[in-house]
Image: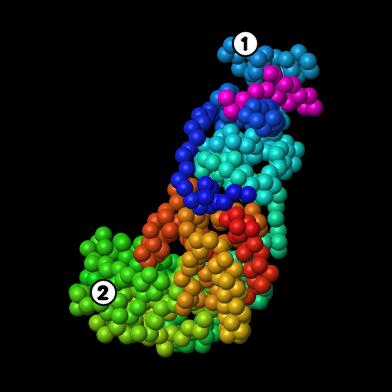
């Protein structure tokens, strides 16, 4: 096999093959046509596939000396089918009309009885990729069976065969290469794969719900459904559950129960903390804010809003390893120390896993008279976190990062901090956060956190061993780099020179491995992570990043499988 030098997994820039497309939809019937493609360029192969001619894209008949498309339209009515070769049609004749006429003559059915033979499964914005893929490989997505709607792939493409197509240089167009990967993911998704067969290495994104947490939650999702603000017995039972959870969480993170404000999760907690800083600044004539350049969007975007409203927002740069040091914090805030209303520096980074010296950073900020907040979403439940010891005024965390339910979290606010409600309404949470409490979620969060800390030290040691083994295995791949020093036990951010992180993550998914790209992806473009750019990486290097985040549920077999798949993907097997 050739090296990955000319593929989306790494190496040279690609040029796109320009292939036009048509979009046809007759509004009444969905037809299916059969395409034969001949490859008269020495391959001596002919492939036949069934394509949907409805709302999806259609590859035009084309003879460019390399690929010849011969179209044959196919229609179905009841148990009858009819094929209309393109050459049989009069100039400009709609094949659907021809099919209706011939079917009516043959079967006696009226035109309105025409039914689809199959429906291509596609998604918005996918047509271009489908055309590029189809032009290069002759593959189509497949059909949904008209009776039961099950996905039926008309062409099966093996994972290894697909990677061979790319690695061998047979498919050199970058867009086509990505399309092949997307096709494989689509093919895989519609042959449902149970989670038990997955290797889940994306725990920094979310974790599974602990059975212990679920069991604790169930009574409050069923018979104990009361509103904690109600005065009757059902409401009182709910209130008692919330307050019991509050006390349990306070004991674990070492704060006072009345310092715990329940929220909908980490993002709300972070937004609320910056809202408190803003209000504090307005009341004390302070119009400057400091955050690190590696904060989660839940901090950086509210900070941008404050900047738009006239606040001076300073970003504290990390060193090349991703660390935000106390000395750099002191240096950055020195020019604005008298105007500083607050600072927000995360305890541990969600992309690199770097753990910051929050106690010393907190001391430096609070010496200026400003408030200090830390986003501890990635830390709580994974390493020991002592709110009083770190000295912060506010701290955020979220249940679903430590096997609790999604949609619930907390903001710890030190006594004496002037809390301005971020959400206005009722008097819940001692008038600090309006809205009926998520009783089941709060109870589940407390149960999950209690379970996590019971084996925290042993779990951290075990997971760190997995991370180190993964680091060692991946380091054997050419172009490897990482910043694993001083990181959380389970997070490992790696890069491979010239590679494409999105393509790697998609390929890992095909091997049954869930990981994360070190970039923010949407349907139209891939942007380099601001965290990695802040560390001084070039955009090309930042886009090559892949994040693995392991957990107590992972095994050494998982690590070996990940290393094997990565070597296969990057063609170093």
Taking 18 as reference, is 512 left or right?
right
Judged by its main secondary structure, the magenta piece is: strand
Residue located at (73% from left, 26% from top): 76
Q: Which circle's residue, 2 or 1, is located before the other in the chain?
A: 1
Residue 45 picture quarter: top right
Asked whether 565 or 335 is in front, the reply is 565
Residue located at (43% from left, 59% from top): 542
Q: Which residue is mark 2?
A: 332
Q: How many marks?
A: 2
Measured in 3D between alpha carbons, the distance from the residue under mark 2 to the one under mark 1, in whole angstroms, is 76 Å
- Dot 2 alpha-carbon crowd within 10 angstroms: few under 14, some 14 to 19, many 20 or more: some
Residue 454 picture quarter: bottom right
Picture colour scheme: rainbow
Q: Can residue 421 be seen here? A: no
Residue 572 placed where, x, y %? 60, 57
Q: Can residue 313 be seen here? A: yes
Asked whether 539 or 76 is in front, the reply is 539
Residue 275: within the magenta?
A: no
Q: Which residue is mark 1?
A: 90
Asked whether 235 or 78 is in front, the reply is 78
Residue 84 placed where, x, y %? 69, 19
Of marks 2 and 1, the one in the foreground: 2
Residue 81 picture quarter: top right
- Badge 1 element: loop
In the image, the segment drawn in magenta is 65-85
- Dot 1 alpha-carbon crowd within 10 angstroms: few under 14, some 14 to 19, many 20 or more: few
Residue located at (36% from left, 75% from top): 324
């Amino acid at each position: 096999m050739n090296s990955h030098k000319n593929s989306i997994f790494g190496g040279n820039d690609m040029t796109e093959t320009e292939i036009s497309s048509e979009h046809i939809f007759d509004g009444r019937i969905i037809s299916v046509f059969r395409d034969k493609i001949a490859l008269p360029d020495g391959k001596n192969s002919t492939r036949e596939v069934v394509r949907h001619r409805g709302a999806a894209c259609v590859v035009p008949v084309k003879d460019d000396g390399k690929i010849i498309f011969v179209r044959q339209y196919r229609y179905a009515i009841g148990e009858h089918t009819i094929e209309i070769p393109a050459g049989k049609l009069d100039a400009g004749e709609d094949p659907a009309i021809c099919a209706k006429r011939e079917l009516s003559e043959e079967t006696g059915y009226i035109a309105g009885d025409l039914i689809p033979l199959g429906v291509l499964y596609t998604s918005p914005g996918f047509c271009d990729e489908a055309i590029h893929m189809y032009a290069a490989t002759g593959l189509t997505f497949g059909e949904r069976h008209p009776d039961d709607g099950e996905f039926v792939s008309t062409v099966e493409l093996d994972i290894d065969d697909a990677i061979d197509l790319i690695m061998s240089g047979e498919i050199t167009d970058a867009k086509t290469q990505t399309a092949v990967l997307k096709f494989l993911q689509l093919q895989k998704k519609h042959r449902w794969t149970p989670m038990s067969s997955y290797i889940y290495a994306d725990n920094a994104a979310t974790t599974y719900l602990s059975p212990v947490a679920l069991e604790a939650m169930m009574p409050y999702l069923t018979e104990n459904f009361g509103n904690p603000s109600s005065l009757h017995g059902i409401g009182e039972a709910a209130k008692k559950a919330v307050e019991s959870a509050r006390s349990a969480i306070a004991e674990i993170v070492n704060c006072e129960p009345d310092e715990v404000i329940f929220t909908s999760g980490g993002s709300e907690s972070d937004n609320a903390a910056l809202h408190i800083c803003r209000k504090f600044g307005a009341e004390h004539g302070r119009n400057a804010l400091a955050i690190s350049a590696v904060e989660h969007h839940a901090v950086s975007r509210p900070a941008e809003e404050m900047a738009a409203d006239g606040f001076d927002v300073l970003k504290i740069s990390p060193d090349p390893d991703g660390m935000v040091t106390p000395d750099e914090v002191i240096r950055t805030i020195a020019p604005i120390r008298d105007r500083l209303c607050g600072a927000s520096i995360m305890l541990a980074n969600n992309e690199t896993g770097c753990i910051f010296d929050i106690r010393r950073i907190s001391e430096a900020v609070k010496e200026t008279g400003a408030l200090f907040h830390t986003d501890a979403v990635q830390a709580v439940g994974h390493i020991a976190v002592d709110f009083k010891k770190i000295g912060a005024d506010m701290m955020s965390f979220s249940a679903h990062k430590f096997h609790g339910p999604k949609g619930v979290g907390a903001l710890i606010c030190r006594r004496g901090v002037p809390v301005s409600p971020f959400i206005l309404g009722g008097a819940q949470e001692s008038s600090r956060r309006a809205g009926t409490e998520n009783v089941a979620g709060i109870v589940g969060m407390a149960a999950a956190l209690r379970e996590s800390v019971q084996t925290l030290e042993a779990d951290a040691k075990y997971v760190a061993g997995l991370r180190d083994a993964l680091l060692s295995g991946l380091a054997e791949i050419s172009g490897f780099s990482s910043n694993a020093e001083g990181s959380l036990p389970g997070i490992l951010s790696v890069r491979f020179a010239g590679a494409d992180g999105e393509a790697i993550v998609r390929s890992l998914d095909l091997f049954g491995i869930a990981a994360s790209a070190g970039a923010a992806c949407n349907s139209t473009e891939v942007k380099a992570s601001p965290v990695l750019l802040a560390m001084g990486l070039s955009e090309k290097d930042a886009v090559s990043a892949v994040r693995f985040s392991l957990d107590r549920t992972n095994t050494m077999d998982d690590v070996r499988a990940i290393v094997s798949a990565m070597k296969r993907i990057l063609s170093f097997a």
